[in-house]
Amino acid sequence: MSDSALHAAAAPGQSSPTILRHARHVVSENPVTGFAFALFLLIATCALLGPHVAPYDPLASDAAAILQPPSLKHWCGTDQLGRDIFSRVIVATRLDFVIALSSVVLVFAAGGLSGTAAGFFGGWTDRIVGRISDTIMAFPLFVLAMGIVAALGNTVTNIVLATAIINFPLYVRVARAQANVKRDAGFVLAARLSGNSEARIMLCHVLPNIMPIMMVQISLTMGYAILNAAGLSFIGLGVRAPTPEWGIMVAEGAANIISGEWWIALFPGAALMLAVFCFNLLGDGLRDVVDPQRRT
Amino acid sequence: MRAPSTPAEHKTALPLLDVRDLTVEFSTRHGTVRAVRHVDLTVAKGETVAIVGESGSGKSVTSYAVMRILDRAGRIAEGSVHFSGFDLRAATEGFMQDMRGREISMIFQNPRAALNPIRKIGRQIEDVLLQHAQAGSAAVAEKAIELLDQVRIARPRERYHAYPFELSGGMCQRVVIAIALACRPQLLIADEPTTGLDVTTQKAVMDLIVELTHERGMSTILITHDLGLAAAYCDRVLVMEKGEVVETADSEAIFKSPSHPYTRKLMRATPRPGISLRGLMPESEGRAVPSPRPSAVAVKDPQPLLVVDRLVKEYPRRTRPLDKIFGPPPGAAVETPFRAVDGVSFSIQRGESVGLVGESGCGKSTTSMMLMRLVDHTSGSIVFAGEDIGSIPAREFGSLPLRRRIQMVFQDPTDSLNPRYTAARAIADPLLRLGNFKTHAEVRSRCEELAAEVGLPLDLLDRFPHQLSGGQKARVGIARAIALRPELVVLDEPTAALDVSVQAVVLNLLQDLKESLGMSYLFVSHDLNVVRLLCDRVMVMRSGRVVEQGPTAQVLESPASDYTRELISAIPHPPL
């Protein structure tokens, strides 16, 4: 227990909400989580304000300044068309972030609901949902995502869809296991006695109780979703040049590494790594916040 | 049962365990909490000492500190712990590992959790023997079998190969005792060794512990919440409250003349023969007008509220997957399904409370689930207020107006409240689903009325379950059950998870509510002493059948069946 948390607990009136106090406790016990939160704020700011804070137009090419190494003028150097890499990395945040977030929200709704239904009702619901997710799991997931985008067409919507589909089994399994435990809890029986219909018990009693674990799952798969979207773009599926996107930028820079222009691939790659790193750390931190075992 | 040693011996000999001024601290996010404060405890050789207290009194933490197995956040802040001359507080971890199991052993509350589920029990006993070099690898199996025999496990040679899940709770606890005693320790710490076991099993296990420890001249610390158990088996009793020892005395003296008010309160709250429900409450809170039990004058309706006739619930036995496809092999005996409830018949009058007593697995919970229409029966009939509710499938029952008239209070108040709902929302749930309320304000005011009825302070209504105490959660559960003014309430061990002083309050509340609202109760319990207080009639169940039923006094004073007699004699009584 650190001093700051002690002060927080002793604060007069204890006006701050419990969740905030608890979050502060977790951060003080595990500074890495605090770092992850800070990183997350940075990424969110870039995603929100990207085009306004970038020093250059990400699409404007400058024939006079191609393949410049990092300097004070161009912090991360320029690429083969003379575009400022720093600006492109910042502006790309929004696109990658939006793709990952919307796919995660989509799979959270679909996978979470069907998994909860499978765990709660069992029987045929369980069998059908289980077989669907088994079928998805039977493919190498990235190859499946490639197939989906290739078949449906090279659009942002399809990247979102493909990323959501390959994450579906993960959500189903977590939700199913949780709902399976909760369906025998006393409060579910009590809800039945109070005249709740089965569907209402599932939505109003079981689902809210598995939310915390699902939130952790969101954060953990968010990093993976970003990586997946960038990966698809890297191999030429999905977002197309000249749109600034981390995966394409790494792909474009990869050709220049041999000739010594390392910065073109390095900086978008580093941004990608930091984003994935941030969401994974955040997932660990969130688990501490929501895990009742750690609440004292 | 008592140790042969005399008090004179205790004083002259150096105590085996000498704990002085022990203070244990835990660091939590709300700061440092002192769970145990300035506790003195001595145990002489051959002595049996009980530490009695309610949950949170620090009785377990004291023993963990002695064993030095406090969890990460806990530490011994002050005081000393000496065990036959060794300073355990200053001892190294390696030394403690040597002491644990060989010199001091411990028995935990849940025997199943204490055993490794995927290891044969014989092997688990051998582990301890080998760890402390008590036997060579050649003779170790024989030694383990001998130990199983000593803890009265029949056919020890076969049971050596059993896994924990193949044994009953009582048998598992015997195995745990065998492990604890394997290295002939000098001190045994038993932490609630019989909580969760049936009363007849409890007696067998406690008798065994006392007999074995006396045979070997061992000392025992028994940690329990049950004053009766402590009195029946121990020489000396320490009473703990909120981390402090409030009273220490010989067990006979403490029951004859308890000096501390907390001890008196605990003793009053312990259900026992010859005491009324009101008599459980502390003197200061005793009611001015002790209301007579009106059940004798219960509404004499010629038609009983509930009639259950030859109720049966069968569960299919496991079939082998191949038999499902090809049918059972020719010549194989056709397995009859397992009958959890086997032809139970009884009736409940309006305004009557009926106790349903039995040990775990006797079918009492299955019976109550069928009455609640949460589970479908196999055959028989359940007639409630003239309607055959047994023929309505459990799935459809929830949407019928009948649902309002039968409600239930669950065993575990924590488990039965949705952790994400406030107390008010939990109480409002049946009102919103089955009540006829137009606005949220109406629901809210009804919730407040109900909270007042069950004695729940109104400012607690907006709290979540984890912010409420056990007794408060029990009140929320009761308020929810009576929200729709049911005619029959099934109480499924409503006080089993509560401390005795809270139990006394909740039982009184239930009695008051019954009197003011005219409900009928079916009180499912394993505790005959509690049933005695609340019920007009009692049914005793064993392996799915009712072995005896009749008026409470008659069944408990002059039981007709051997089983009932066995149940009654197994209850430990304080020597009053």
Image (cartoon, coloured by chain):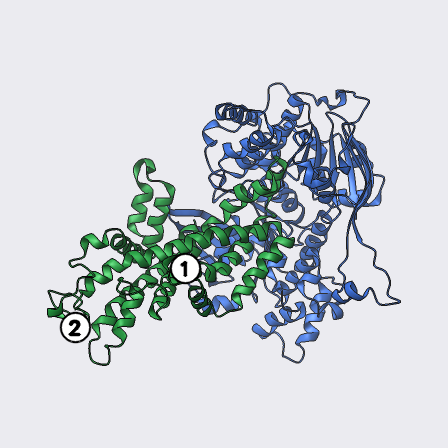
Chain colours: A green, B blue
The amino acid pointed to by label 1 is: Asn
Taking depth in this image into account, of A118 and B447 the one nearest to the observer is: A118
> Which residue is label 1 attached to?
A158
Are dots 2 and 1 on a single chain? Answer: yes
**Left or right: B484, with B394 as reference point:** left
* Residue at 48% across, 24% down: B441
What subunit carries mark 1? Answer: A
Q: Secondary structure at mark 1?
A: helix
Q: Could you say which disc has been placed on residue A89 in the image?
A: none
**Residue A9, percent from left and from top:** 33, 43
What subunit carries mark 2? Answer: A
Q: Secondary structure at mark 2?
A: loop
Outermost right residue = B331
The amino acid pointed to by label 2 is: Leu
Taking depth in this image into account, of A125 and B121 the one nearest to the observer is: A125
> Which residue is label 2 attached to?
A67
In the figure, B437 relative to B212: above or below?
A: above
